[in-house]
Image (cartoon, coloured by chain):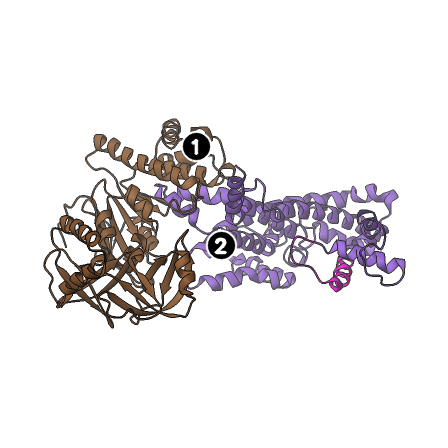
Chain colours: A purple, B brown
Amino acid sequence: MTVDAVPDRTGPRGKGVRAVGGNGPNRLRRGARVLLRGPGPAVPRWLLLPAFLGFAFVIMPLVALADAVDWSHFFTLVTSQSSRDALWLSMKTALASTVLCVVFGVPMAVLLARVRWRVLPLFRAMVLLPLVLPPVVGGLALLYLFGRYGLLGRRLEAMGIDIAFSTTAVVLAETFVALPFLVITLEGAMRTAGERYERIAATLGAAPTTVWLRITLPLLRPALVSGAVLAFARALGEFGATITFAGSLQGRTRTLPLEIYLQRENDPGAAVALSLLLVVIAVLIVLVAYRRVGVPEGRDPAGGLWRWGASGRAQAQAGS
Amino acid sequence: MTDHDHAGLEISVRLAERGLDVELAVAPGEVLAVLGPNGAGKSTLLEIVAGLVRPDAGYVRMDGRALTDIATGVAVPAHRREVSLLAQDPLLFPHLTAAANVAFGPRSRGMRRRAAAAVAREWLQAVDATALAGRRPGELSGGQAQRVALARALAVEPRVVLLDEPMAALDVAAAPAMRILLRRALRDTKGRSAQRTAHAPSAILVTHDIVDALTLADRVVVVESGQIAEQGSVAEVLSRPRSAFAARIAGVNLMIGSAVAPSSAAEFVDADRTNEGRAQRDSYQGTISARTGSTEMGAVHCGADTVYGRCAGPWEPGTRAAAVFSPAAVAVYRERPAGSPRNVFRVRVAELTDRGGVVRVHAAERGDGAAGVVADLTPAAVAELGIVSGDEVYFTVKAGEVQVYRC
């Protein structure tokens, strides 16, 4: 579409363009030129091909999925009792695990970014582990900690607390895999931000807690929001650790991804419909998160301030 | 170590990592300018006083109370020091309005919201920024932001104000206004606090701009590569520089070496008189005599060169001494001037720079690594001589134009 629109913008056909043969390639070439015109240095044209192939590879499966949906029954399929149970459980547990991620992840990020202990690099590596670990392995590990015969589970059971194969287990499994997303996002933001504002706040007489509450946290808000959104998304899609550690009990531990996996055998139509639902939710989440992360200027303080703040001010000055 | 009842700020710190080793004192209410080239350790010094950086050794005391003392392990945290800092970058908290920024300090020190807001209003008014109260830092120009930052630094009524090149990031239009404001604010603070408390706040102003020192400071300390090169009143340091940096900002040539007996120095002046228009010379030297009360001569042996000049007071051969002369007093020749009684240096031209109607000829670095002598010529003279970088030329300066002194 873009290619077709180009000749209109650049005036009469062929003007100022090396003749390369027929009309078609000529137009294409000009289209590519306009496509690759950015504010920065020129992008090599041949990059277009692999780039578009890559985009297609990401987008086409989703198109195929949408194509496979039996639209006449879509609404019935996604509103069946088991679907609603799964959706509700997924939302509930993902939200709970996001809260846990924030409660524990923020202090973890602060420690990793601001404190110099010799063991911290090791801690950071361990926190990142769930990112690279197969989730099934994570679920198994959790089982051996919290399971009935687990390291901690034995003692908890003696106290009458049974975690494995409960909704709590779902939340723990999701927290385990989602935590790195929040910690990494926040730690990166804190490192980029530096400590300059905190130092100034201290010279103004603010005690560390005051500085933390009134300066550090407000400045981190955008990173905190995008980190939490990412963690929520990861928790929502969690499958491997959940099925290993929490099992698949309808209404208690069967989240949406588990429901999709099970329905795939009995009722592929329902599985496809639920999958599309999950895709839509994921797209919404990505849009929200990307809007936060991807737009550094504007009124968003953390973005505007570190790198763009000074130049923005210079412009304001030049303008006045 | 010294008497603990000393009023004001006493600093004696070493920090090996930055090569800093400095000892100085600031009296209550005094504004001390710390001058020096980039990387001399000026900002580090301020960070140590503010409690943001820990020195390797030494102490920082305020009115005899230790803020930092490595020997006894005292390290008062930054927020309990009553030392506020204004940096080159205003660093206003971007999520707070200008008024909330100024109120932040008083609020943090436990003041009620309403009282803090009143204090903020007062200080914004003091820096002519009342109209900016409701704006966010992103909506302020550099000069406006720095004014608000000054109000914020002063609103906590600190005992010491540290100013780290507060004008450096401002454009040509905003800097003078800020300088005037700073002067007023520092003087006003002094006046106010003198009425309220026994101790007026002290200020340390780090800068590499001589105008800041001239307009704001009571006293100047020149720091070079982490050490104090010289200190004194602004006038003293400028008229008799003892460090390359001070000489440069004073705009004079400085040669440091050892004093030697001015054996034939007197003849130099006499010969000078015969060679030059006598009447003019006489009147010129008359003024020198009147000013210094003496026309004694001295000489400074500096590397391969010996510089003759006039000195005030007794001249003791063997001591460290400096010779100072203006770049405008230096004449440049292609050939060694024959039989001239002047100071003559054979130099290689390193570069020529334009200084607005005058061309400055920079000689290459001296053998001992000291900065080369510079000469100011008219563009016409440069064209006539045909000087380019790399040429070997002779710089001459009359002994009567050189001032020598012990340092």
| Identity, as a three-letter code, of the amino acid under mark 1 | Ala
State which quadrant residue B127 falls in: top left
Q: Give the tally of numbered discs.
A: 2
Please report, as a chain letter, where disc 2 is located.
Answer: A
Rate crowding at label 2 as few (under 14), some (14 to 19) or many (20 or more) other CA atoms within 10 Å. Answer: some
Instruction: Where is residue B375? Give x, y as percent.
Output: 33, 60
- Residue plotted at (52% across, 45% down): A309
Instruction: Where is residue B69? Give x, y as percent.
Output: 23, 54
Q: Nearer the viewer, residue A94 or A3?
A: A3
Residue A230 at least partly seen: yes
Which residue position holds label 2? A191
A104 vs A14, left or right, is left
Which residue position holds label 1? B99
Disc 2 vs disc 1: Cβ atoms closer than 8 Å?
A: no
The quadrant in which the C terminus of chain B is found is bottom left
Residue A60 at least partly seen: no
Numbered disc 1: secondary structure: helix
Alpha-carbon distance for marks 2 and 1? 28 Å
| Identity, as a three-letter code, of the amino acid under mark 2 | Arg
| Stretch in magenta | A38-58
- Residue plotted at (79% across, 44% down): A78
Q: Nearer the viewer, residue A8 or A312?
A: A8
Instruction: Where is residue B108? Give x, y as percent.
Output: 37, 37
